[in-house]
Image (cartoon, coloured by chain):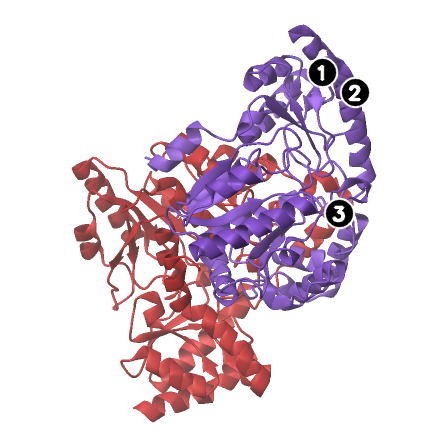
Chain colours: A red, B purple
Amino acid sequence: MISTNMQEQVKNSSIIRAMFEEGKRLAKIYGAENVYDFSLGNPSVEPPEEVRKAIIEIVNQENAISIHGYMNNSGYEDVRTAIAASINNKFGTDFTHNNIVMTVGAAGGLNVIFKTLLNPQDEVIVFAPFFGEYRSYVKNYEGKLIVVAPNIVDFQPNLAEFKAKITPKTKAVIINSPNNPTGVIYSEETITKLSEILREKQKEFGTEIYIISDEPYRELAYEQAEVPYLTKYYDNTIVGYSFSKSLSLPGERIGYLVIPDQATDHEDIIAAANIATRILGFVNAPSLFQRVIAKCLDAKVDLETYNRNRELLYNELSTYGYGCIKPEGAFYLFVKTPIEDDIEFCNLAKKKNILVVPGTAFSCPGYMRIAYCVAYETIKKSLPGFKALIDEVK
Amino acid sequence: MISTNMQEQVKNSSIIRAMFEEGKRLAKIYGAENVYDFSLGNPSVEPPEEVRKAIIEIVNQENAISIHGYMNNSGYEDVRTAIAASINNKFGTDFTHNNIVMTVGAAGGLNVIFKTLLNPQDEVIVFAPFFGEYRSYVKNYEGKLIVVAPNIVDFQPNLAEFKAKITPKTKAVIINSPNNPTGVIYSEETITKLSEILREKQKEFGTEIYIISDEPYRELAYEQAEVPYLTKYYDNTIVGYSFSKSLSLPGERIGYLVIPDQATDHEDIIAAANIATRILGFVNAPSLFQRVIAKCLDAKVDLETYNRNRELLYNELSTYGYGCIKPEGAFYLFVKTPIEDDIEFCNLAKKKNILVVPGTAFSCPGYMRIAYCVAYETIKKSLPGFKALIDEVK
């Protein structure tokens, strides 16, 4: 009795989430300490202490009706002002609260912006490998996902293929940097060239093409790597941000969209995003956490913990003979599977209680994603398993 | 550049929300104390003290990673178990955590269930007057809203018209009791007859028709009025609940769906609702507030405050000559406008700084909704305005 669309979805349900459930099942059998679950991007580093303090301060000092009540669908004006100021301070932009729409995480924000922009059959370009959920988000609004094949040399986008795939139906391009699943940061050179191509194509077709910059991993950049702020390179850029990873609050569903005045039809987009927030049933981003993050805009999770994991995993796996490029950001290592069939390899790994996600889930077969947002000990204890796996198949 | 669909939405944006913004504008000019804003169902009674205590207890005692982290898309299992037990205790049902899907408020829950059930052109029946957002929720999934005209005698649903409007394309019926905007509780007799009609029609057409019981006002029933629990009357019932009003937490976006084992294809519906929660971008109901409400399932807002407002407003407006039936629940009074054109009348009211919503917004022209979730003083001070208004037009 469920809809045809959802019947299909139930059948092909997220591999990542299925792994998450599988991990919990194995943990019950073998004990959590003997299962090496690298399947989910669930932060392993505690939220900064500022978060707890902010929560307590707010509920003890502010009016309960207003901290838990309705506000404008775009969010509290003072919170949006604080966010705009923080972005301006970091990137030299000139946003006001009008440019900010608070969202139920980045996933909520992406749904809001696709609802706002897409007509049926509009095309949205993504660069493989990419977060598989984009497929569903675009499909929700009957958009058509156009995949640019992976550039397996360095996982910067393949810009020649990108250029060839832009059509008069292209409405948006998703950029996700630092990238899930590769951990690669798209370089300033990439962004500059990509923007140039988009400007050319806009002119050629007389259309507007929006970059949707999905940035949940912006703050997770190692060795002070620069992550270009895309609104500075391309006017029709809309940013989707989330505090899920930057403050380790993925369950709280708090993020925002930035819709700059430089974007064509920005007033309509802002008005529509406000309405989309309401009618999709979000209504508003959770109210207490809007106020909490406004007090924590300068707080940071301990990046060094992820960095230690990154170094250990990258160095050891490279030594064993796995092919991987060192991630510059996020908390994922994207590794070539020693056998071609990545799903088969991930099943072999599961037999050693190692849970990793096949690259196929990211439209990049022959690879696997290892989410290293886990305890250091978990990585250490998993290493013999990783070694045995490659030795067995080589 | 926004989608055709959203262009239309921007044009016809919610009257209620527009009023809310108008109220804030007038408050800036005349001072908040001189504006009588009855436009929005934003609780005026403080959340129970248990909420603040639960928040502090949880953030001080529980592990920060797990209280703010991802969990199953349907929500924490222990929270869902607690909710199931609480419902079972109150209504003699036999739900388990499997029957509960935590949602981003009732609006989120309704979107999840419509995404789950509706194929394009499937029909969803509503009884006027009804919450205008239902129109958008159904449209989001290309369903067709079928409106049963209001029964202005007592605002119980018109069951003869209902029966005549059920077709082989009917997939769902929305029940909202206590009702927004009338405050009427659908009687046991209504529910019994309505269920009987649905069973007949299911048999006649060989289809499944689901009742979607939207219950944000369940706990707001005056004088111990009984609100029938619909799963006990009709197997294909799905309940959408919210803590927005029962605990005065509308901004926190926390609620749940109940999908009973008695509902046809319940396993598929549960699986699909879980996935819909994810792909629509909710991902999960806000995590801290899942844990908070689990500790507050027996807590209640002070209903007597709303009751005093109800008595004052109903008694005075009736005395002035307004036609209204006394609400049994929720915090709305639905009043016949003294002139036929309800929009015109609400504009006249605005000139007296009284903000009320025309019945047209609820598909019931000739009426207005007064949300009395405001300070008692606000009602008192607004009364001369209400009196002057009816005197002027009579």
Find disc 1 in the rendering and name its residue: B386
Mark 3 belongs to chain:
B
Name the residue beneath numbered marker 2.
B316
Disc on res. B336: none
A383 lies left or right of B348: left
What is the x, y in percent for residue B124?
A: 47, 45
Q: Secondary structure at mark 1?
A: helix
Question: On screen, A326 above or below B316?
Answer: below
Q: Amino acid at mark 2?
A: Glu
Q: In the image, what residue occupies the spot 40% across and 91% down?
A: A388
B198 with respect to B61 (left or right): left
On residue B226, the disc is 3
Q: Quadrant of the N terminus of chain A?
A: bottom left
Q: On the same chain: label 3 and label 1?
A: yes
Q: CA distance from mark 2 to mark 3?
A: 26 Å
Q: CA distance from mark 2 to mark 1?
A: 9 Å
